Amino acid sequence: MTMIEATAVGARIDGAVVRNTALSSTGILERVFSAAFRGLVYPQIWEDPLIDMEALALKPTDTLVTIASGSCNVMSYLTANPAEIIAVDLSPAHVALGKLKLAAATHLPGHTAFSNLFRHANLKSNIALYQRHIRPHLDAKTRAYWDGREFNGRRRISRFTRGFYNTGLLGRFISAAHVIGKIYGVDPRELLRMDSIEKQREFFQTRIAPVFESRSFKALTSMRASLFGLGIPPAQYEALAGDAPDGMTGALRVRTERLACGFPLKDNYFAWQAFGRGYQAGDSASLPPYLEARNFETIRQNAGRVTVVNESITALLAARPAASVDAFVLLDAQDWMTDGQLSDLWAEITRTAAPGARVIYRTAAAQSPLPGRVPDAILAKWDYRSEQSLELGARDRSAIYGGFHLHLKRDAAA
């Protein structure tokens, strides 16, 4: 990446995150988070793709615009056979990861190799897969990223030989949480031995919950920077902390309890990543749809329908024709936004939305951030599906968000 490109990337991320002056305490934190976000944050995305696809009801004629993040869901959406997916992200690392996955799906010899790279993600042989089958098909910028060196001198692609899901801000945060657990005499992996929700709940209540009540844990989570590893900027920290009577500690306890006890472990790969640091072994393991063997040929055939762009979603939509997008996935990005940014985004969503378009997003707090912040004239063009949103959110296995939200474009004649 050239100096000019790096400056442009930094400016876009600052525009999304920075709200306060550089000399204020919050402003300093915002700039630290912005700098961290220029690298890899999410080795795995933490939104349930099955819930997404149910809400979006994708059709073979649909164009979908989504924030990429780790691109797990971008790849999984291909199983629904949409006509086109445009994935955007402010992080160059996330863009490089998405392009790596697409090239791997297209050019690796089969599902076993694809699974070795992205399911196991810790095999020495993965370097040879990259060199022989993927690297020659990457654009120069993506190839330079994966060939580039980390501070320890290793190439970035070598992360897939050492446990890719332990890397990035999120991967390191989860690893640190395991260390904290062990300091208090708890090995989170033991949860994965439980064979019923009742036993999962008992393990959480007797072993994990007491950690949240400790004075040192409360002190740690009271610092906004401590949650940068979850990809939570200062603005979103306030929303999450305000969603529980006992602040951030209570919010984290509730979300962790739901992740640990809300679903059978055999059905929840998010729990395996959080408590086991990887995907479950075995042919019947819960996996993201794009990693399931039965979906590999569909993923391979449809990979050419995806474009990955290093841009903000608002800027990308501003360059598109009116009524040209059928589905939008905003992840939790709106928690970061000012009123002006929200209004600009929804103005472009409304302009580019085709008849019957769907928008989904998640929030740290339970309530949607739109009412009172986006002009009523814009929101009047959308039907907010409150009951369906609650029902879908209750079934979201990632379990870490306060709310899931679905909007449908109203008929212009209504």
Image (spheres, rainbow, N blue to C red):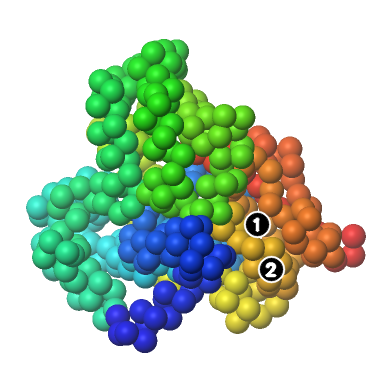
Q: Is residue 129 left or right of residue 396?
A: left
Q: Is residue 161 left or right of residue 187?
A: left
User: Residue 241: which quarter of the image?
Assistant: top right
Residue 306, given in percent of the width and then of the height, sits at: 44, 68
Q: Residue 98, labelled with which disc?
A: none
Q: Residue at position x 75%, y 65% from top?
A: 355
- The residue pinned by badge 2 equals 340
Q: Which quadrant is home to the N terminus?
A: bottom left
Q: Amino acid at mark 2?
A: Gly
Residue farthest to the right, as pictured: 414
Q: In the picture shown, does residue 158 fall above or below 14? A: above
Q: Secondary structure at mark 2?
A: helix
Q: CA distance from mark 1 to mark 2?
A: 19 Å
Q: Residue at position x 37%, y 30% from top?
A: 216
- The residue pinned by badge 1 equals 359
Circle 1 residues within 10 Å: few <14, some 14–19, many ≥20: many
Q: Is residue 119 visible?
A: yes
Q: Which quadrant is home to the C terminus?
A: bottom right
Q: Are marks 1 and 2 in contact (CB under 8 Å)?
A: no
Residue 102, given in percent of the width and then of the height, sits at: 34, 65
Residue 262, given in percent of the width and then of the height, sits at: 49, 26
Circle 2 residues within 10 Å: few <14, some 14–19, many ≥20: few
Q: In the picture shown, does residue 301 fall above or below 249? A: below
Q: Amino acid at mark 1?
A: Val
Residue 342, given in percent of the width and then of the height, sits at: 67, 64
Depth order, front residue of 243/193: 243
Which circle, 1 or 2, is nearer the viewer? 2
Q: Secondary structure at mark 1?
A: strand
